[in-house]
C-alpha cells in the first residue's frame, strides 16, 4: 500500500520542479548582485562610459574631471558633466543588472506555472510569458536610458569626444524580446486552435 502511494506521488511530480528551483536560485543571485550594483552606481561620484576620438587610443587632452580607466573608456566626475545625462546614465546602469535578475525570476515563474498546469495554453502560463515580455521591455528601456545618458554626458564635455555604444549590448535583450513576442503568438494561436477543436469534439 505504501509502495503504491509513493509511486502515485512520484507520478504526479513534475519534471520541471528541479529546473524551477535552479531558476529561482539564479534569479535570487541576479537580484542580489543587481541590488548591490544599483547602490554602487547611484552613489558613485563618477560615471563610466565608452568614447571614441579622432585622436589616438590614449585620448589625450581630457578636460578636468575626466580620466581614462581603459582604452576608450573614461570616468567622468558627476560635477563635470550635464546633470540630466548623469541621472539617465546612473539610472540605466543601476537598472540593467536588476532587470536581468527580474527576467530570470520571470522565467522561473514560467517554469513553475508550466509544472502546475495540465495544458501549455493555460492562463497561468500565458501570464508568466507576459511577465517575461514586460521584464524585457523594461530592460530595453534601461539600456536606452544608459545610451542616451552616455551621449548626453559625452556631448556636454566639449572635449572633441564622441559617444560609442557597442551595438551588441542591446542585441541580446532586443532579440530575446522578439523571441518572446513570437512565442506568445504561437501560444495564443495554439490556444485558439485548441478551443476550436474542443468545440468540434
Image (tube, helix red, strand yellow):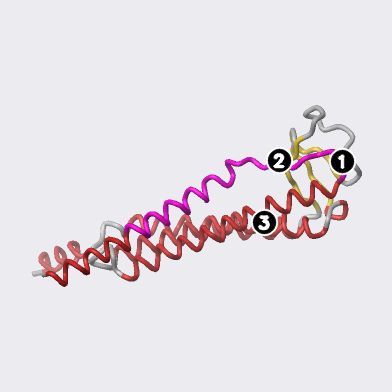
Residue at 32% in and 60% down: 187
Q: Earlier in the sequence, mark 3 or mark 2?
A: 3
Q: Is residue 82 above or below residue 72?
A: below
Disc 1/disc 3 C-alpha distance (Å)? 22 Å
> Which corner quadrant holds the C terminus?
bottom left
Q: Residue at x 87, y 55 (%)?
A: 79
Query: Residue at horizontal 79%, vertical 45%?
Result: 75
Left or right of residue 41, residue 130 in this image: left
Instruction: Give the x, y percent position of residue 70.
Output: 74, 35
Going by the image, does 139 lie left or right of 17? right
Which one is nearer the viewer's eye here, 196 or 184? 196
**Which quadrant holds residue 54?**
top right
Residue at mark 1: 159
Where residue 30 appears, as percent x and y from the top left, is 53, 55
Task: Point out the stretch of residues depicted in magenta.
Answer: 158-186
**Marker disc for residue 145:** 3
Give the spatial CA distance, label 3 vs label 2.
14 Å
Q: Quadrant of residue 94?
A: bottom right
Q: Is residue 184 magenta?
A: yes
Give residue 196's quadrant in the image: bottom left
Task: Give the residue at the far top of this rendering.
Answer: 56
- Which is nearer the eye, 37 or 127? 127
Queried whether the magenta region covers residue 151, the answer comes back as: no
* Dot 2 alpha-carbon crowd within 10 angstroms: few under 14, some 14 to 19, many 20 or more: some
Using the image, tell me which numbered label, if any, was put on residue 91.
none
The answer to whether the residue labelled 1 contacts the one labelled 3, judged by CB atoms less than 8 Å apart, is no
Residue 193 percent coordinates (x, y): 23, 63
- In the figure, is residue 73 to the left or right of 66? left
Residue denoted by label 2: 164
Residue at left 87%, top 51%? 80
Amino acid at each position: 500500500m505504501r509502495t503504491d502511494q509513493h509511486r502515485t506521488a512520484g507520478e504526479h511530480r513534475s519534471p520541471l520542479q528541479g529546473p524551477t528551483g535552479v531558476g529561482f536560485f539564479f534569479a535570487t543571485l541576479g537580484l542580489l548582485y543587481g541590488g548591490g550594483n544599483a547602490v554602487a552606481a547611484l552613489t558613485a561620484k563618477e560615471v563610466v562610459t565608452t568614447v571614441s576620438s579622432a585622436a589616438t587610443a590614449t585620448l589625450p587632452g581630457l578636460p578636468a574631471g575626466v580620466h581614462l580607466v581603459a582604452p576608450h573608456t573614461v570616468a567622468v566626475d558627476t560635477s563635470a558633466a550635464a546633470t540630466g545625462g548623469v541621472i539617465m546614465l546612473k539610472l540605466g546602469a543601476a537598472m540593467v543588472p536588476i532587470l536581468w535578475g527580474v527576467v530570470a525570476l520571470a522565467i522561473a515563474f514560467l517554469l513553475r506555472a508550466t509544472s502546475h498546469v495540465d495544458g501549455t495554453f493555460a492562463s497561468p502560463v500565458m501570464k508568466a510569458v507576459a511577465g517575461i515580455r514586460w521584464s524585457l521591455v523594461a530592460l530595453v528601456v534601461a539600456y536606452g536610458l544608459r545610451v542616451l545618458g552616455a551621449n548626453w554626458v559625452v556631448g556636454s564635455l566639449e572635449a572633441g569626444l564622441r559617444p560609442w555604444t557597442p551595438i551588441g549590448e542591446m542585441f541580446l535583450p532586443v532579440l530575446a524580446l522578439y523571441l518572446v513576442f513570437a512565442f506568445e503568438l504561437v501560444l495564443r494561436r495554439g490556444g485558439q486552435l485548441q478551443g476550436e477543436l474542443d468545440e468540434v469534439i
